[in-house]
Image (spheres, grey):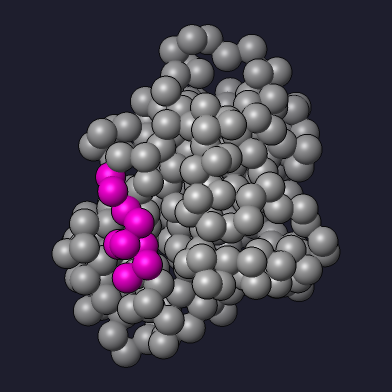
Amino acid sequence: MLIDFHTHCFPESIAQKAVDKLAFASGGLLPHTDGTVAGLRRAMAEGGVTTSVVMNIATNAHQQQKVNDFAASIHNGEDIVCFGSVYPGSEDAFEELERIKALGLPGVKLHPDYQGFRVDDEQWKPLYKKISSLGLITLFHAGLDYGFPPPYGAMPEAMATAYRWLDSPVIAAHWGGVNCHEGVLQHLCGTDIYLDTSFGYSMLPKYYAAKILEKHGTQRMLFGTDTPWHTAGMELRLLNTLDLSDTDRERILFRNAQALLGK
């Protein structure tokens, strides 16, 4: 079994445009799918992925409902599990969180750089409290984002503050932060935060991957790819170099995700 806890896809009508725009903004990143649900499923079959968790992002207040309607339309709780999203600061963010819960979506994705906020700004405490009260999982994009200039909204020190304001599970994507391995070791490892492994292959040196696992343990690690930008095969190549025990490997590849998702 293999659960990919960090993937992306888009409505078929906008998928190609969305992937092209994101690839260009990020300096020409090469996508490995066409951005559609069908493309995601083809990548899953090629990579041996049993379940993909799709992360949707509301990049403005007016997008929230459409983004979450799309998430609900493809979420089946089996091979496709979807997170919703809200735009922090929008007038109906709390109501939309309630709707996400009612739609049966298990969590929310927040991306501080796309959404223009810092994760450790105290004005978001009520939002985090609402998320927690609904028992929703929160996955934050963490670290640098190649499509945006600095400063970035979810560096490790900021994540170390923000995650403590939530009482439901929190995931810092990309091994705790893209290109932030020293900060992750200093501020996040050994805490209760989950880290996913997405976008690690060729980006995170093996030395730091091993150090993060050594200090953080494997009980709160989740396999992820960031499809369409990386594939399951790519991320498995990195993990296969880390001399993991069978128990540790199973935790990362599916058992921790199963526990979080109640599968």
* Location of the N terminus (image quadrant): top left
**Displayed quadrant of residue 247:** top left
* Location of the C terminus (image quadrant): top left
Asked whether 110 or 104 is in front, the reply is: 104
Residue 26 picture location, percent across and down: 76, 64
Residue 53 picture location, percent across and down: 42, 47
The correct choice, above or below, for 109 with respect to 187 in the image is below
Residue 236 inside the magenta-drawn segment? no
Q: Residue furthest right?
A: 27
Residue 32 picture location, percent across and down: 68, 47
Q: Is residue 26 visible?
A: yes
Residue 189 left/right relative to 181: left
Residue 74 inside the magenta-drawn segment? yes
Which residue is drawn at the image coordinates 40% and 72% (left, top)? Answer: 67
Q: How many marks?
A: 0
Which residue is drawn at the image coordinates 21% and 63% (left, top)? Answer: 103
Which residue is drawn at the image coordinates 53% and 57% (left, top)? Answer: 36
Magenta highlight range = 69-77
Residue 173 picture location, percent across and down: 54, 49
Chief secondary structure of the magenta portion: helix
Which residue is drawn at the image coordinates 64% and 12% (left, top)? Answer: 243
The correct choice, above or below, for 200 with respect to 137 in the image is above
The correct choice, above or below, for 242 with respect to 16 in the image is above
Q: Is residue 125 visible?
A: no
